[in-house]
Image (cartoon, rainbow, N blue to C red):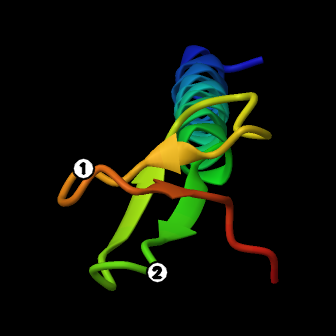
Amino acid sequence: MNPFTWFILLYVGSALVGTIVLWLWHDSRDKVSFEIHRRQKAFHCVRCGMLYSLRKHDVSEGEACPECGYKNYELSF
């Protein structure tokens, strides 16, 4: 094979590998960001009407409103 052909194959191959690596890196970063937002719990205070969210796993006993301190339970959709 011609040396120029090897150069073209290496150039195209490295560009393809670089694109795949960037794609996988961006996909994993996007997945982590999505998981952080997915685990948030939404609350609506019945006393003052404030909407707020928390990143807690167990909120079965309710969470205090940051505005007035009233204990509210997670919203269900």
Q: Amino acid at mark 2?
A: Val
Q: Amino acid at mark 1?
A: Pro
Please tell me which residue is depicted at 24% across the width and 50% down the height of the picture.
66
Give residue 75's position: percent from left, percent from top. 69, 72
Quadrant of the image for the N terminus? Answer: top right
Q: Which residue is mark 2?
A: 46
**Foreground: disc 1 or disc 2:** 2
Query: In which image quadrant can residue 12 be found?
Result: top right
Q: Give whichever of discs 1 and 2 has the lower sequence position.
A: 2
Q: Is residue 20 above or below residue 14?
A: below
Q: Is residue 64 above or below residue 45?
A: above
Give residue 72's position: percent from left, percent from top. 55, 59
Front residue of 19/71: it is 71
Q: Which residue is mark 1?
A: 66
Q: Is residue 32 above or below residue 73?
A: above
Quadrant of the image for the C terminus? Answer: bottom right
Front residue of 12/4: it is 12
Q: CA distance from mark 1 to mark 2?
A: 13 Å
Front residue of 29/22: it is 29
